Image (spheres, grey):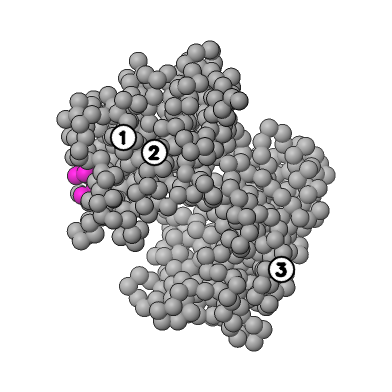
Amino acid sequence: MIPVRSILVFQISLALGVALHAANDDSKFLLPDVFDFVQLSPDGGHVAMVERPVGGDVIVKIAETDNFKLDLTHLSNGKGGHTDVTGMRWLNSQKLILTSNLDSGNGLYVFSLGDKYPERWKKEGKRSLLTTIRGTTRFIVKETSEDGEPEWSRLVAYDAEKGESSAETIYEVKSKTLEAFFDAEGKLRLVKKTGGEGETEAWFRIGDGGEELKLTGLQPWVRVFGVHGTSSQVVAAGDFGGDGSSLVVYDIDADKLTKTLTSNSLYSFGDYGDVAFDATTGNIAGFHLQGFQTQSFWLSPKYQKNQQQVDEILVGSVNRILDLSLSGDRVLVERTFPMLPRQVCLVQHSLKSVYVVANGGGKISPDEVGTNKLFNIPNREGDILSVVVTTPSAFSDGKAPVLVWIRPQVWGGLDRLEWSPEANYFAASGSIVIRINYRGSEGLLGPLAADKNTKDGVSKMFRDIEDVVEAFVAAGVADPEKVAIGGEGAGAWAASYAGKLSPNRYRAVLCINGVYDMEAALDEKTGNDARAGVDLPFASSWSGMPREDVLSFQTVSDIETYPKFAFVCYGKWSPGENTAQATRFIKTLKKAGTTVKPYFGDWYGAGLDGVKRFEAFDRAQSVLKAAFK
């Protein structure tokens, strides 16, 4: 019998080729999505969105869906100023509720169609928008105490017609930790909070008279999406004793699970599930599973029909319904593509029309990018790893340079079969880019789970990376003399450590805004931010990993041999301890005989964006080209 590993390696060699194409103006591949909170008004008459252009001021865009005439709404007090929108929701078809950090904390704003500037109700304080109440002009926000103050959280209801003076506190606790869910009529039904002094978090049902009952069957780590209509039921996700993770309907009055909607043994619904509620009834319409690819499952016949109609119109993309007008004729759809930036489109069934509301990323044509495919590669234990492979746009038989790219949060999130700015940026110059969903990636279950608070759990990701690289070399796709690894943030640390583990495997290591000194990361006595915004969970005091195990992942010292080329960049305005460890890392690599190109960019910590990001990646690209000559 032919081993599974050999069959998959053969499949790789058939599916991929060599790219010899270099794109002009590669920086456009790095342009991020500049839009967020794209929403359709209940009557379908307007679309609202927040635009965050690179280097520009944040504004709200509102367009009439009949002619898409734009109205630009500036979020300021009339005197200009830069801001960000942290929450936005249609209250009804004429008003938007927003929270914005233009002022101290998150200011509260009410915007009416036709106004140039929103009306500012609250200037200071920390607040988030929780819900609007269908059929009324009421909405509810959560407010929390400022840092340094005694901790508290409260739920405040407002009426947009009555103004700021309508504020009514409906719930309050002496803690910053509070989650709250309301039924369709705006009645508080469920909260998660600390039960009392020294107690852990728990879910509490709120009765009709305000009485509270602690739930024992709904565990605090379970994620709740919302109340299922006006009933006593909520939709929740987590481990309910079944096969892996489940999405369920839970009765909070009876404190028991009433129905399992679906289960998945590969990844957690709590991390990757997203429930959609019917705007008309408030009941669950369906759910999205955002794993390696996005899948939508509709329980509502109305949404099922809309999904079918949308898929017939918008081909070549995964189509996720974001919003549906009350009439059902107008549908707001997010389109994700394997090889192009995402779009948000408005589909109008009666006119059989499609209008692109928002385009993500730069202006890129299909002939400028290659394929993006998902492969299943077994590691040495036989566990199947999902690997996303991005190839350049021109192909021929033979071997190609390969770059393994590690996501900034290392274990946070998944690499999906969709557009990646970084992967396509490097692929534009001729490299095959490999992104690996190694063991321990957030939300992966079963054999793909790993305890990142142990030395072995952290080490599993590096073994998986090596196994995938070996598979591509064995398949005759990767040129064994032209393999590099790189990453950003915590991914830069992972790339630096992979280079230390396997100096003969990689030709180059690209480190952008990384952390390299585990001792500095552990030492919290200095008051300096040695990580400068880079998250390394295993090096945190709460992880429980023994100090000697944490220090075993050091890369600023104990390096005798290292890959031939390296790129190391960081913000020159970062905390002194952060820049010091990067400098020591550079000296260590030079001592090991590595040709290092350092770059001290004009930014702080991990805050690399806009033109600064283009400059850093351009320099990293030059190192890659030198290594692959």
**Label 3: element kind:** strand
Question: Would you call the spot at circle 1 few (<14 residues within 10 Å), some (14-19), or many (20 or more)?
Answer: some
Residue at 43% of width from left, 24% of height from top?
402
Of label 2 and label 3, which has the lower sequence position?
3
Q: Nearer the viewer, residue 148 or 433?
A: 433
SS of the residue at dot 2? helix
> Can residue 373 be seen by looking at this rendering?
yes
Q: Which numbered dot is residue 258?
A: 3
User: In the image, what residue type sits under mark 3?
Assistant: Thr
Could you tell me residue 157's position as x and y percent?
Answer: 58, 76
Residue underneath mark 1? 501
Which element type, helix, strand or loop, lies under badge 1? helix
Labelled pair 2, 3 in contact (Cβ < 8 Å)? no
Residue furthest out toward the top: 397
Name the quadrant containing residue 341. Answer: top right
What residue did someone put label 2 on?
A: 462
User: Residue 477, percent across and down?
Assistant: 49, 20
Q: Is residue 289 above or below residue 541?
A: above
Q: CA distance from mark 2 to mark 3?
A: 42 Å
Q: Is residue 581 magenta?
A: yes
Q: Magenta part of the protein: which range?
A: 577-582
> Is 576 covered by the magenta stretch?
no
Q: Nearer the viewer, residue 31 or 109?
A: 31
Pointer 1 or 2: first along the chain: 2
Alpha carbons under labels 3 and 1: distance apart: 50 Å
